[in-house]
Amino acid sequence: MGLFDFLKKGKEEPAKQPTGTPKMNQMPGQPTQGTTASTNQQNVTGTSQDTYTVKSGDSLSKIAQRQYGNANAWTKIYNANKTTIGDNPDLIKPGQKLTIPRD
């Protein structure tokens, strides 16, 4: 039996379409059609916010300077992220995801 002998067996038939509801093209991780839940619900309390991932060498004041143009606004970031950061605002770790309030 040769390498391509399987091609000679049987006759060629077009692929059959599955029965039932046609599948819509969707990106992986996206909700299916008809789902009401949002996977990116950032505007829960009516305030606008972004997310920032802490990098090595970051401090809250450096992040505030980049995000708001004012290093003194670090308290705004800290207050929004106390549960993630903990009691010491000087101790943030690379990889932590922080909420950046936008109001």
Image: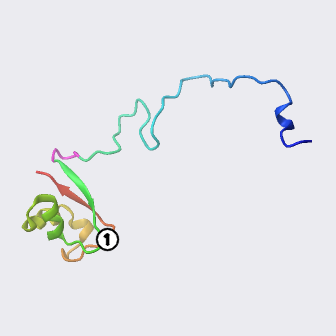
Q: Residues within 10 Å of mark 1 (few under 14, many from 20)?
A: few
In terms of secondary structure, what is the magenta stretch mainly?
loop
Q: Nearer the viewer, residue 43 or 6?
A: 6
Residue at left 82%, top 33%?
7
Instruction: Please provide percent x and percent y for residue 2.
Output: 89, 42
**Start and end of the magenta stretch?**
43-47
| Type of amino acid under label 1 | Pro
Estimate the x, y position of residue 63 in percent, counting from the top left.
Answer: 18, 65
Q: Which residue is mark 1?
A: 94
Left or right: where does residue 73 sit relative to residue 90?
A: left
Q: Residue 43 placed where, x, y %?
A: 22, 45
Say above or below: 58 vs 41: below
Q: Is residue 35 magenta?
A: no
Question: In which quadrant of the rendered view does residue 16 lie?
Answer: top right
- Quarter of the picture holding the N terminus: top right
Q: Would you say 41 lies left or right of 7 here?
A: left
